[in-house]
Amino acid sequence: MNELMIMLFAPLLAGFIAWVIDVRGIREAIGIIGAAIPLGILIQYYSTITGSNPHVEYSLSVGGFKLLFQLNTINWYFAVIASLVGVAMAFGMASTSRNSYEWLFALMSYTGVLGVFLSGDFVGFFLFWELMTFASFMMVLRRNKHESLKYFVLSVIGAYAMLIAIGIIYAKTGALDFASIRQALYMDAMVGSMSKSLTALVFLLFVTAFGVKAGAFPLHVWAPGAYSEVDQSYTTFFSGALSKAGAYGFLLLYILMGAKLYAALGTWHGHMMFSYIIAWIGAITVVVASFLAVLQEDIRKLFAYSSVGQVGYILLGLGVGTGLGITGALFHVLSHAVFKGLFWLVVAALILRTGKTEFKDFGGLAEKMPVTFAMALIAVMSLSGIPPFAGFASKWLIYEAAISAHMPLVAGAIFLGSGLAFAYVVRFLYAVWFGQRPSDLEDVKEAPLPLLIGMFILAIPNLVFGIAPGLVTKYLNKLFGQTVVGGNYYKLVTPTGTYNALLVTVLLIFGIAVAGLIYIYGAKARRIPITNTYQSGNPVTEDYNLSIRRNFYRPLAEALEFWLKYSWDRFYERLARMFEDFADFLREGFYNGNVQSYSWYLAIILLILALWGVL
């Protein structure tokens, strides 16, 4: 069998075998091996992808359709990221999963994601998209039916939107493979046979389909519940890899329809209209999700909203539409996968060892779980955009791109989102790891070894690609066939600025050393009561106790009270109830148990068929 097929179906096969055997220890070993095989094969292909002919192709005939699979510079990058997160997920699940059901569907979704990235035509792309969605839906369904239903309904809407868009493209181009579609739409951009309104409709349908999976505003409402209501080790993959399928879809829009969208929709204040829309979707997603993350009292919901917000940076970078913006967005695909995947493994360890999820129940765990704390610290610094970690490098490139493209408001969203991210991770850092430890957490132990291995797998790229970001940008330059981001392995150079990661690292180490000396030989620390905290000008009462672990950002919630009254989640639920009531009305009206009514229905249908010439 071709190596691409082995890489694609190894996780699915391993999940099936683990499900059938269902023996503790054996299923975990099979699952880890199945997850590692794609990463090993992709590493072997690195020399080919970076060579003079970076293209590998394989076709497969299924049910009269010819499925095309290919490996090139772009999808190799996405597949490697998904595989890296997939291996970390497998090690995490070896510690947190207790049944073969989760192994089956977790690894099935792994195959689905790889299939989306490797497909060279819309038939395979859609089939694996649905496989990915079905498997992740089954993971949510096991623990929370309400959240799984929400995820299912929005995914179905996205799937039908994509199917309609694919049908329109096929009707206009007569092709389903990406290469032919790209060429046909490029020619159509000059001829103009596909109308502007139809082009806009296809764009809207694809934005809906990919926006659902990416969790973009206002289609994000499924993500907080779905990310929270599965095994948190699996959420590493759910958030770190599945959401990237949506980002990959937006990138595919540029590749297949960029010229046609530009010709049909034109520009707005010097920016391509379609990319400007994507940029603002990303910017709003960043701000809204970051505010909601700050207000959460449950660490799972906090990082669920955070995951949504961080994907917004990717859409924002893609929406800038320049080579620098797309480079920054693709860099953030990597950095988000590794720092948010690491966060979810840390959350999995906390839940496994404490059984708790709310800030009010934590405290002082750095002493009990020192290795997990070190991993959390790396994730915190990378997510909040502190150099020299990968999260800073990618956000810096996106910000530089927004400034270079003269999009100050979009650039402001980056700053605001980063500030809010720092606000919620600082609370996580202090409330969970420092301060007074509750008495029922005195016997907490360090995370199990497999879970720690998964953390290390994702912590290392946060450091390596933060200190040497040029490793990533030099590869991404190959996508454009030119130097978009200059410099070397340790220094990034753009038209508007320079970032020397190695120099920042040296200065940071020096600063930490000085701070350590001051801490050791400086003033003595003193103990203060845990209730000795700020009240934002309010009287100190038990009802208004703003400790780091309880209601810490309550003043912000009060300031945003007007906006928090409006919720897309509640709006969709009301809409769903309206459709449900309308469906009940139709059911009661037509299916009334009256045989005479049914006879009239049949007569009307026969009359319509006769008028159409069918009978």
Image (spheres, rainbow, N blue to C red):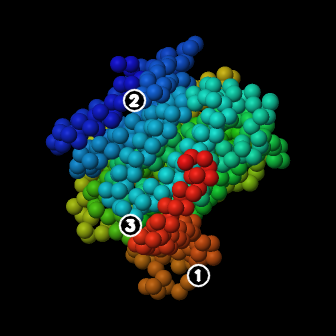
Mark nearer the N terminus (1 vs 2): 2
Q: Amino acid at mark 1?
A: Gly
Q: Residue at x 74, y 33 (%)?
A: 259
Judging by the rendered image, the residue that carries numbered circle 1 is 537
- Would you name the residue on which mark 3 appears? 358
Q: Earlier in the sequence, mark 3 or mark 1?
A: 3
Query: Which label's residue is closer to the chain start, 3 or 2?
Result: 2
* In this view, 532 is above or below 227: below
Q: Which residue is mark 2?
A: 8
Image coordinates for residue 415, horizontal then vertical, percent: 65, 54
How far apart marks 3 and 1 lie (CA) works out to 26 Å
Q: Nearer the viewer, mark 1 or mark 2?
A: 2
Q: Could you give the CA–CA distance between mark 1 and mark 2, rounded to whole angstroms?
A: 59 Å
Tag shown at residue 527: none
The vertical placement of 402 against 305, above or below, is: above
- Residue drawn at (77%, 41%) of the image: 195
Give the secondary structure at mark 2.
helix
Tell me if residue 328 comes above or below residue 359 in the rendering. above
**Nearer to us in this view, 22 or 343:** 22
Q: Position of residue 97 (x, y in %)?
A: 26, 49
> Image check: 247 left or right of 462?
right
Q: Position of residue 41 (x, y in %)?
A: 39, 23
Q: Classify residue 474 by image quadrant.
A: top right
Query: Is 608 in front, or is 307?
Result: 608
Q: Is residue 374 visible?
A: no
Where residue 431 sits, quadrant-wise, is bottom left
Q: CA distance from mark 3 to mark 2?
A: 38 Å
Task: Residue at 28% x, 62% y: name it.
Answer: 355
Amino acid type for the residue under numbered disc 3 = Glu
SS type, badge 3: loop
The mark closer to the camera, 3 or 2, is 2
